[in-house]
Image: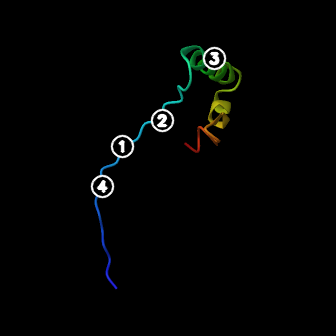
Amino acid sequence: PSIHMIKANIETEVSPMVGTERQSEELVRFLLKEFEEDPKKIWESNMFGKTLHEL
């Protein structure tokens, strides 16, 4: 058997802004409201089927 190693420089970006500008603004307002009530709760927000913490 042999082992093949490949070096790859990979960068990624998570951009929760989806849909129209108005929908994006509503999302930001919702997240800010959650953050004001409990700062740790923002990491539990569901985004694309996963929490922000998981992303």
Q: Check disc 4 and report its element: helix, strand or loop.
A: loop
Between the residue at mark 3 and the residue at mark 2, the CA separation in whole angstroms equals 18 Å
Disc 3 designates what residue?
26
The tag earlier along the polypeptide, 4 or 3, is 4
| Residue 40 spot, x, y in % from top left | 65, 32
Disc 1 designates what residue?
11
The amino acid on which the numbered mark 1 sits, given as a three-letter code, is Glu
The amino acid on which the numbered mark 3 sits, given as a three-letter code, is Glu
Viewer-closest of 43 and 50: 50
Residue 52 falls in image quadrant? top right
The quadrant of the rendering that contains the C terminus is top right
Disc 4 designates what residue?
8
The quadrant of the rendering that contains the N terminus is bottom left
Left or right: 12, with 41 as reference point: left
**Residue 23 versus residue 45 in the image, above or below:** above
| Residue 54 spot, x, y in % from top left | 58, 45
Q: Check disc 2 and report its element: helix, strand or loop.
A: loop
The tag earlier along the polypeptide, 2 or 4, is 4
Residue 19 falls in image quadrant? top right
Q: Which residue is drawn at 56% across and 18% down?
A: 20
Viewer-closest of 18 and 33: 18
Disc 2 designates what residue?
14
Q: Do the residues labelled 2 and 4 touch (CB within 8 Å)?
A: no
Looking at this rendering, what residue extends furthest in the bottom direction?
Answer: 1
Between the residue at mark 2 and the residue at mark 1, the CA separation in whole angstroms equals 10 Å
